[in-house]
Amino acid sequence: MASKKDSNVIIVPLCYQLVLSTDGSGTDSYVHLDVPELEDLGPYIKQITLHTDTQRPTTNFSWNLALWRGFDTKLWTGPELLLPAHITTNGYVVQPPHTDRSKYGMKCRIALAAKNTAGTAIEQATISAALAVELVMA
């Protein structure tokens, strides 16, 4: 559930200590998240900052956050990765903000993206993630 502490920033928890696995390929596989707080915010988003905590990643594990956008919920465009590079390191990190407002759309849908950096083994890590969504003020 989103919470407001400031008039133009909401905090949206995404997952807590979730074991995320790759499919053994070098391409992203997606785990779609049900985040109704974001679905209608697209036109109002100024920027999104992702807070991540990655624990015990296996050697070739990497992950990112993906965003789909659309005019309605029937047809989606994407994915748009929110981070310039996949996360591969252990620990808590406040990631650089995503500020390209053309990627948010009228409707938004979000997913975790996991892939191997090398090899074909199933890789995994325990992850936690939350968004700090800054809204455009009128």
Image (cartoon, rainbow, N blue to C red):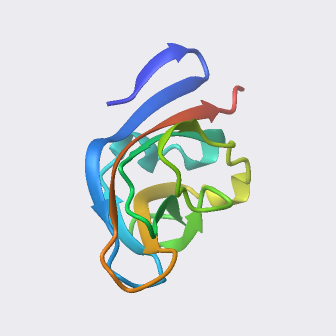
Q: Would residue 39 be found to the left or right of residue 97 on screen?
A: left
Q: Quadrant of the C terminus?
A: top right
Q: Quadrant of residue 93?
A: top right
Residue 61 drawn at (x, y percent): 43, 66
* Residue situated in front as seen by the camera: 121 or 74: 121
Q: Would residue 16 be found to the left or right of residue 80 on screen?
A: left
Please give the count of numbered marks on the rendered protein.
0
The residue at 52%/75% (across/down) is 117
Q: Quadrant of the N terminus?
A: top left
In this view, the residue farthest toward the front is 59
Residue 17 drawn at (x, y percent): 27, 42
The residue at 40%/60% (across/down) is 111
The residue at 71%/52% (across/down) is 101
* Residue situated in front as seen by the camera: 11 or 94: 94
The residue at 60%/39% (across/down) is 49
* Residue situated in front as seen by the camera: 134 or 130: 130
Residue 64 drawn at (x, y percent): 51, 59
Residue 47 drawn at (x, y percent): 67, 41
